[in-house]
Image (cartoon, rainbow, N blue to C red):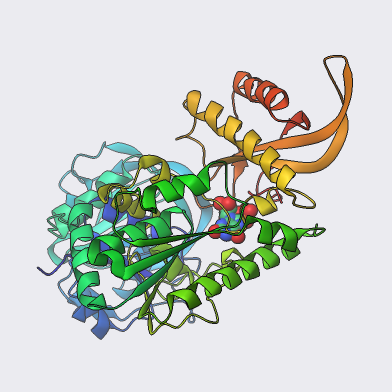
């Protein structure tokens, strides 16, 4: 069966991945392509609809991103968002100009057309997110205005007969109260999508095509215990059973019990068929890290050592046909292969590819999925929820959440403190609301009193942030009682910790990690 596809044509705006995610939430497969993609290529994909994104330029400037007018003659429905809406008007003979006032933020939009397919079921006055300097002064011939705001005469316009729709606001962001419904109206009502992109059928067909691709070959996977590599491993295990070997390097910098949890799922007592190799390399990492205090240096050492350990194991396994990579769709887009908005994220790729692993080809079973879809696939594949809903965890692990020198004793301290923190956050029902939260061990010791004894011990820093994209973040407001409970448990239960502080710094100027 040919799968339905909606294409997002990327003009460099900041919410472009969000558009694709929202479309996929409607159970319609959606991919992002740069505006530089040739129309022949788009046509060949036979899309059910095309969405033009926002972007930072003015469409009437000569060097601004543009597209051939032919796009609007394909008979394929097109929705232009923000810059995309202006470009549509500009190319089709309307007028776009610089506005006197910049419209920015939550704005009341008044719907002028009750018939518009885009606005079926939408309130006559609805809050939308605006962010634009330019505005549509005059819609293109054949278009009717379907919504306006106090400052913006054309907040939406359409040529229903040609299935062309333009909205000045951003339906993809959550601040647009009924944005999801509008996008659903576009993909179902205008494009006529059936919405049959479902995780169970994706998983099933991915397993089938992995089985065909691998044949009787051997596959090697570096399993970190994180969501992506775990889901990739299970998918392959379902496809090819013990033609798959997973190497799990325990570098001794994992969260409390994590190594055993990974082994319980993937090891011989787990329910999946595969060869599982756990390498207990704790001592090796601790001795490499002895005396090292500089965070970048620690990252390098951990990354390099990880590769060396993995290579040694790979040598024992011998030549394989495929090496698994847990690349997910945002990595594809952000590395410039998909859309237009390049985000530099290389500092997160610990280590890179091993120099010595004898393999012919890389397989990336999650290449088409967003993170939340990877989680859904994980649940579909029967992975336990605690593993699937894991928070982001840096490759160098607790090695960077210990300020100063890393020692086995300090690892134990931060593991215990972090465990208590996570436990209390979950008990308070806050775990699903927070973006990321963890404990770090500062390198500061100070005087305290315990019983009648003077102590001179370490301070633990608690961190919790809310974030949409992990590029910026703000510190989360944890209820005082929860912080007090965590503090009292940590100082009572974790030896050599006599003080707990809460980090209120946002990103920027801080980072999410406390390293
Ligand atoms: P920062 O500290 O840069 O972190 O604000 C942003 C997000 O990235 C995670 N992070 C990493 N993830 N390898 C990873 O896989 C890394 O080396 C790494 N460093 C930071 C961090 O936990 C946060 O979610």
* Residue at horizontal 68 percent and vertical 25 percent from the top: 493
- Observer able to see residue 91: yes
Q: Quadrant of residue 126?
A: top left
- Whole-percent x, y for residue 250 in the image: 56, 56
* Residue in the foreground of this view, choosing between 101 and 490: 490
Judge from the rendering whether residue 419 lies leftward or rightward of residue 109; answer left or right.
right
Judge from the rendering whether residue 325 lies leftward or rightward of residue 349; answer left or right.
left
The extreme left residue here reads 1
- Whole-percent x, y for residue 327 in the image: 42, 67
Judge from the rendering whether residue 20 lies leftward or rightward of residue 229; answer left or right.
left
As drawn, 495 above or below 84: above
Q: Quadrant of ligand 1?
A: bottom right
* Residue in the foreground of this view, choosing between 115 and 444: 444
Judge from the rendering whether residue 138 lies leftward or rightward of residue 350; answer left or right.
left
* Residue at horizontal 18 percent and vertical 64 percent from the top: 205
- Whole-percent x, y for residue 114 in the image: 18, 43
Q: Quadrant of residue 4?
A: bottom left
As drawn, 57 above or below 377: below
- Observer able to see residue 54: no
* Residue in the foreground of this view, choosing between 349 and 492: 492
- Whole-percent x, y for residue 47 in the image: 19, 70
* Residue at horizontal 35 percent and vertical 56 percent from the top: 231
As drawn, 244 above or below 105: below
* Residue at horizontal 74 percent and vertical 60 percent from the top: 287
């Amino acid at each position: 069966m040919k799968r339905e596809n909606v294409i997002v044509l990327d003009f460099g705006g900041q919410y472009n991945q969000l558009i694709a995610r929202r479309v996929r939430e409607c159970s319609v497969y959606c991919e992002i392509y740069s505006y530089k993609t040739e129309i022949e290529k788009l046509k060949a994909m036979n899309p059910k609809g095309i969405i033009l994104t926002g972007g930072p330029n003015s469409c009437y400037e000569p060097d601004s991103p543009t597209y051939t007018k032919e796009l609007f003659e394909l008979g394929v429905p097109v929705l232009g968002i923000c810059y995309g809406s202006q470009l549509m008007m500009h190319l089709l003979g309307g007028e776009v100009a610089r506005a006197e006032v910049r419209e920015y933020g939550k704005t009341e939009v008044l719907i002028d057309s009750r018939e518009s397919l885009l606005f079926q079921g939408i309130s006559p006055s609805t809050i939308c997110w605006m962010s634009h300097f330019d505005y549509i002064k005059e819609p293109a011939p054949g278009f009717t205005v379907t919504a306006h705001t106090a400052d913006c005469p054309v907040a939406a316009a359409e040529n229903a007969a040609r299935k062309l729709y333009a909205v000045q606001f951003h339906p993809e962001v959550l601040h647009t109260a009924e944005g999801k419904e509008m996008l659903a109206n576009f993909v179902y009502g205008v494009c006529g999508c059936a919405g049959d992109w479902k995780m169970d059928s994706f998983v099933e067909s991915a397993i089938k095509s992995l089985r065909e691709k691998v044949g009787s070959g051997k596959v090697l996977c570096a399993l970190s215990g994180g969501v992506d590599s775990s889901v990739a491993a299970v998918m392959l295990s379902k496809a090819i059973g013990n033609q798959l070997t997973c190497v799990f390097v325990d570098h001794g910098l994992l969260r409390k019990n994590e190594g055993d949890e990974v082994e319980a799922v993937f090891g011989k007592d787990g329910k999946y068929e595969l060869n599982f190799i756990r390498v207990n390399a704790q001592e090796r990492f601790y001795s490499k890290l002895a005396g090292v205090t500089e965070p970048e240096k620690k990252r390098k050492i951990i990354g390099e050592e990880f590769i060396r350990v993995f290579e040694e194991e790979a040598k024992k396994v011998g030549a394989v046909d495929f090496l698994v990579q847990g690349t997910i769709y945002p990595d594809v887009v952000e590395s410039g292969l998909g859309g237009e908005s390049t985000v530099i994220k290389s500092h997160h790729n610990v280590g890179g590819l091993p120099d010595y692993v004898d393999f012919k080809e890389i397989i990336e079973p999650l290449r088409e999925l967003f993170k939340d879809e990877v989680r859904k696939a994980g649940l579909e594949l029967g992975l336990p929820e605690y593993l699937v809903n894991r928070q982001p965890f840096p490759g160098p692990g607790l090695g960077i959440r210990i300020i100063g020198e890393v020692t086995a004793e300090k690892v134990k301290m931060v593991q215990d403190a972090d465990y208590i923190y996570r436990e209390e956050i979950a008990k308070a029902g806050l775990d699903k609301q927070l973006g990321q939260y963890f404990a770090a061990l500062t390198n500061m010791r100070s005087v305290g009193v315990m019983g009648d004894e003077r102590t001179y011990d370490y301070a633990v820093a608690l961190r919790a942030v809310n974030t949409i994209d992990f590029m910026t973040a703000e510190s989360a407001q944890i209820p005082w009682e929860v912080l007090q409970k965590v503090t009292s448990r940590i100082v009572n239960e974790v030896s050599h910790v006599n003080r707990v502080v809460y980090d209120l710094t946002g990103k920027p100027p801080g980072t999410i990690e406390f390293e």
